[in-house]
Amino acid sequence: MRDYIALTVLLFVQIVCAGFLVGGTVLTLLGVEHRPLNWELRELLEIGATLGLVFGAVLGAIVLNRGLRRQKRAEDQLRQVSGAFMELLHSRFRDWGLTSAERDVALFAIKGLSTPEIAALRGTAEGTVKAQTNAIYRKSGVNGRPQLLSLFIEDLMDDEMLPNLATDEPGPEPEPFLRVVH
């Protein structure tokens, strides 16, 4: 929010400075009669407007750099979370003793693909995918896709994996809305 306000003020100052620098020329081109300023005052105003534009460019570069650093940090964090999620998936799949085919089906199911879509991607019959998803649910101790997904969401919401966004410290223990025993 602070950067937004700074950029708004910066843009306003630059528009005023640029307007002053080109204002006289634009008025002359439009044929508008105006009283010229004293040359000494005009020189001071032009120097001030030029300094304002230079100052604005420097501040703009600083704000842009800060935004790019923030974006890179967010991308790094997303990459870490994505890697942690994949580690969690593979760890659970190993713990449950899923076959290679069941792992593929489980990944597609967690991504939200339907049974016909999974069958088409894997080049198998829908009945085969249904049998594999039933085996996955049985091995993981859940009754369906929503509960399967909730297992991973619950693990990600664990206080050790979910830092407090304001302080980058672990947050409090979340209240489980669904506790699946396996």
Image: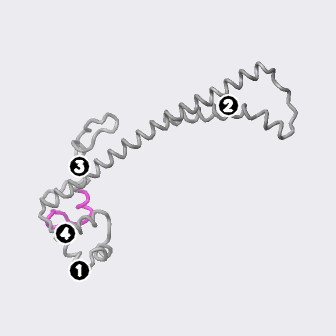
The residue nearer to you, when weighing 157 against 52, is: 52
Mark 1 / mark 2, whichever is N-terminal: 2
Q: Which stretch did the figure color magenta? A: 136-150
Residue 56 percent location from the top left of the image: 58, 31
N-term mark: 4 or 1: 4
Instruction: Tell me residue 112's x, y (percent).
Output: 32, 65
Disc 3 residue type (three-letter): Pro
Answer few, some or many: residues within 10 Å of disc 2's Cα (few below 14, many 20 plus, some between 14 and 19): many
Where does the image place residue 16, in percent across and percent down from the top left? 68, 32
Q: Which mark is residue 17?
A: 2
- Which label belongs to residue 42? none
Going 46% across and 37% down the picture, which residue do you hit? Answer: 65
Find residue 127 and name its label. Answer: 1
Residues under numbered marks 4 and 2 in contact, where contact means CB atoms less than 8 Å apart: no
Residue 176's label in the rendered image is 3
Secondary structure state at the residue bearing disc 2: helix
Near mark 3 (Cα within 10 A), the count class, few <14, some 14-19 or many ≥20, is: few
- Say which label, 2 or 3, has the lower sequence index: 2
Give coordinates of residue 165: x percent, y percent: 33, 39
Quarter where residue 54 is shown: top right
The residue where tag 4 is placed is 102
- In space, the residues marked 3 and 4 are separated at their CA atoms by 27 Å
Query: Which mark is in front, 1 or 2?
Result: 2
Q: Earlier in the sequence, mark 4 or mark 2?
A: 2
Q: Cβ–Cβ below 8 Å for labels 4 and 1?
A: no
Asked if residue 120 is positioned above or below residue 50 in the image, the reply reads below
Task: Mark 4: give few (<14), some (14-19) or many (20+) Cα within 10 Å.
Answer: some
Alpha carbons under labels 1 and 2: distance apart? 71 Å
